[in-house]
């Protein structure tokens, strides 16, 4: 792990990689996350991939401030946007992604939840973590940020 996140985003060191990101460029990336582990108590590996992305590239010389990251949660991943209290009430377990999401936000990662997913599952704004913003829809966030040059990563 590290240097961006010590508790999340473990990666392997690759010696003599033939392809690396240029360390003199800024990168704008949007992660589209709509799946999750079936067990509510497990960390969402796709959200952890955001920390992995940042750690891996920082380990290879890309400064943290050259990574502008956005995450969009929708579909099954909506539950990751819930407050600790609502998550525990709903799933009878500790929120496995709360600390990771807080750590990402602390590093200026913007996290949005789809308002359509939220409403379709009966949740309200008060049920959403203070670390997560509400977008009209996942589609809205994806179109807005891609129109601003963000590269989409989607491997759900």
Image: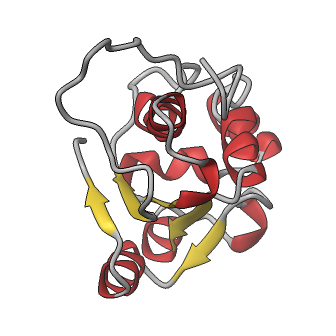
Q: Give the percent coordinates (x, y) of residue 136.
A: 49, 85
Q: Quadrant of residue 38?
A: top left
Q: Nearer the viewer, residue 96 or 50?
A: 50
Position of residue 16 in the picture relative to residue 50 (left or right)? left
Would you place residue 78 above or below residue 35 in this image? below
Q: Examine the image and state in which quarter residue 32 appears.
A: bottom left
**Residue 46: percent from left, percent from top:** 40, 36
- Residue drawn at (50%, 53%), measured in percent from left and top? 78
Q: Position of residue 49 (x, y in %)?
A: 43, 34
Say above or below: 57 vs 74. Answer: above
Location of residue 37 by image quarter? top left
Residues 85 and 139: in front is 139
Query: At 32% across and 46% down in the image, what residue appears?
Result: 21
Residue 36, how many percent across, how many down?
A: 39, 35
Residue at left offset 33%, top offset 42%: 35
> Foreground: 147 or 96?
147
Number of labels in the image equals 0
Q: In the rendered image, which quarter contains the N terminus?
A: top right
In the rendered structure, the answer to whether residue 152 lies left or right of residue 10 reads left
Which residue: 71% across, 21% down? Answer: 6
């Amino acid at each position: 792990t590290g240097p961006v996140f010590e508790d999340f985003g473990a990666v392997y060191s690759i010696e003599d990689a033939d392809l690396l990101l240029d360390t003199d460029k800024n990168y704008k990336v949007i992660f589209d996350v709509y799946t999750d582990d079936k067990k509510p108590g497990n960390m969402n590996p796709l959200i952890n991939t955001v920390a992995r992305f940042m750690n891996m590239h920082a380990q290879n010389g890309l400064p943290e401030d050259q990574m502008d990251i956005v995450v969009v949660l929708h579909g099954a991943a909506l539950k990751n946007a819930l407050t600790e209290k609502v998550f525990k009430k709903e799933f009878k377990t500790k929120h496995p992604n709360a600390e990771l999401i807080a750590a990402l936000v602390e590093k200026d990662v913007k996290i949005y939840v789809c308002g359509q997913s939220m409403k379709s599952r009966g949740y309200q704004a008060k049920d959403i973590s203070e670390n997560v913003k509400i977008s009209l829809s996942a589609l809205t966030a994806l179109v807005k940020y891609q129109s601003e040059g963000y590269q989409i990563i989607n491997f759900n």
